[in-house]
Amino acid sequence: MPEKVKEIIARYTEADPESINGDSKLVEELALTSFDVLVIMSDVEEEFGIIVDEDMLMGIVTVNDVIKRIRELKGEDK
């Protein structure tokens, strides 16, 4: 799953998926806008068959945060 998330994020940046790591900050390091993050999360919802509540978006800062939310929503957070 982490590699697929990196591929989705890379679509909206000039970064290569291999250069994106779990600690990469979406806005500060990858130069994404808040709108980009919303679009990415929409793509994530579609890819993984989940629905991300708006309240969950507030805590998403890094790539690992995206992965954590997916795991939580899929019941894989253990």
Image (spheres, rainbow, N blue to C red):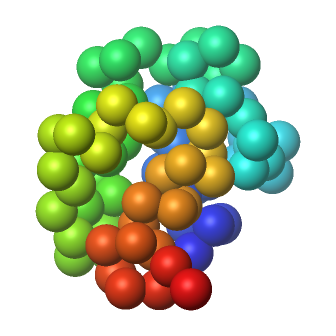
Residue 44 seen in render? yes
In the image, what residue occupies the spot 66% across and 28% down? 25
Q: Is residue 31 above or below residue 41?
A: above
Q: Would you place residue 47 above or below residue 75 in this image?
A: above
View extreme (right): residue: 19
Instruction: Tell me: 29 left or right of 5.
Output: right
Q: Quadrant of the C terminus?
A: bottom right
Specify whether 43 is left or right of 19.
left
Measured as percent of width and height from the top left, residue 74 is found at 34, 81
The residue at the point 63 percent across, 52 percent down is: 64
Snapshot quadrant of residue 1: bottom right
Q: In this view, does 68 lie to the left or right of 30?
A: left
21 lies above or below 69 = above
Looking at the picture, tell me which residue is in the foreground, 9 or 60. Answer: 60
How many dots with numbers? 0
Along the line of sight, the residue nearer the viewer: 55 or 24: 55
Q: Where is residue 58 drawn, in percent x and y?
A: 34, 31
Is any atom of residue 14 visible in this view? Answer: no
Nearest the viewer among 21 and 57 is: 57
Quarter assignment of residue 31: top right
Q: Nearer the viewer, residue 10 or 53?
A: 53
31 with respect to 34 (left or right): right
| Residue at the (52%, 43%) spot, across then down | 9
Residue at the spot x=42%, y=60% of the render?
69
Residue 6 x %, y %: 61, 53
Where is residue 12? Give x, y as percent. Answer: 47, 31
